[in-house]
Image: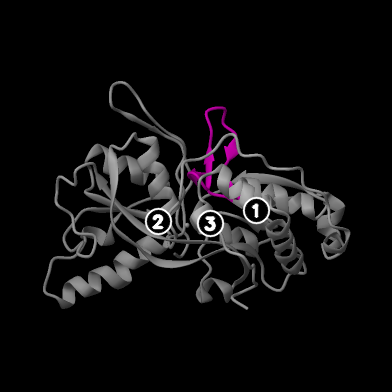
Amino acid sequence: MTVRTPRLIALTVLATGSLLLTACGSSSSSSSSSGAPSASATIKDVTADSALAALVPADVKSSGKLIVATDASYAPNEFTDAKGTIVGMDVDLAGAIAKKLGLSADVQNAKFDGIIQGIVGKKYNMSLSSFTATKEREATVDMVTYFSAGTGTAVKKGNPDKIDATDLCGKKVAVQTGTTQADAVKNTINPACTKAGKPTVPNNGDQFELQTDVTQALFSGRDQVMLADSPVVDYAIQQTNGQLEKIGSVTDTAPYGVVLPKGSDLTKAVQGAIQALMTDGTYKAILEKWGVQAGAIDKSVINGN
């Protein structure tokens, strides 16, 4: 998910050529995935760590659960399956973190651009939603790193409009609202276009609340190119049977962070849980299940420290 990027839901290409999308969306900056999701990946049961559980704030411990917000439109990180269940890499990690802390995870769907406000307002205990860990966000909330991602660029198969990923000036670019990609169009790409005397990306990008709508805009021809986190771009290409393709290289690689209330005692507990999951192999197994193991990191830190 760069500064928060949206996610993508499950994509199914129908015989008529239309596209069904259900997904989540958020941050950008992502490394590309190194393989297709593996339904056969084995994830062993997670056992609670008493020392880490002791760090959990009393009010959370008494509730027995972590309320986790995610924007379920950003497959394979977080999306809704055919049964309406929220699934994905972030969802599995949230469940494993909760178990390591002796809790259960109550994952709730939320609009990406309202999640941080919900964390600050104590509506949610934490969020795994492809949020890129940035200093700007860390001024408001704590962010515990757990993955590395960057921005990928996708076009229709064969690149009919001859898009150059390094020069999007004047092109119709689809992005998810509130993401790093949306910020990049407004704050980096368009100023550079203006400086070069070239036309800017119209309206600072064609922005959608859901990543699934971003992908649909490209697939339908409404837009010429889409920017999203690299795992999301890779998954969209897989799920559309190659009717989309990636161009250029992954840029702005940066860590994703679990979002938690600023200064919360829960922050250290979550960081410890993630590190423990890395050590016992659960973390690797979850990433391999969703085909995003290329984004694995070996150390989780709080606010870049």
For the question of whether residue 249 can be seen, the reply is yes
Question: Is residue 76 part of the magenta span, yes or no?
Answer: yes
Q: Which mark is residue 131?
A: none
Residue 50 vs residue 81: left or right? Answer: right
Which residue bears the numbered disc 2?
177
Q: CA distance from mark 3 to mark 1?
A: 27 Å
* Rendered residue at 19%/47% (across/down): 159
Give x and y (percent) for residue 302.
65, 72
Q: Quadrant of residue 183?
A: bottom left
The image shows a total of numbered marks equal to 3
Image position, residue 95 (x, y; %): 70, 47
Could you tell me if the residues under marks 2 and 3 are in contact, i.e. CB atoms within 8 Å?
no
Please tell me whether mark 3 or mark 1 is closer to you in this view. Answer: 1
Q: Which residue is mark 3?
A: 114
Instruction: Decide if residue 176 is in sight here.
Output: no
Residue visible at 24% across and 69% down in the picture: 190
Residue named by callout 1: 283
Q: Amino acid at mark 3?
A: Gly
Label 1: state its secondary structure. helix
| Residue nearer the viewer, 29 or 127 | 29
Identify which residue is drawn at 63% across, 78% down: 305
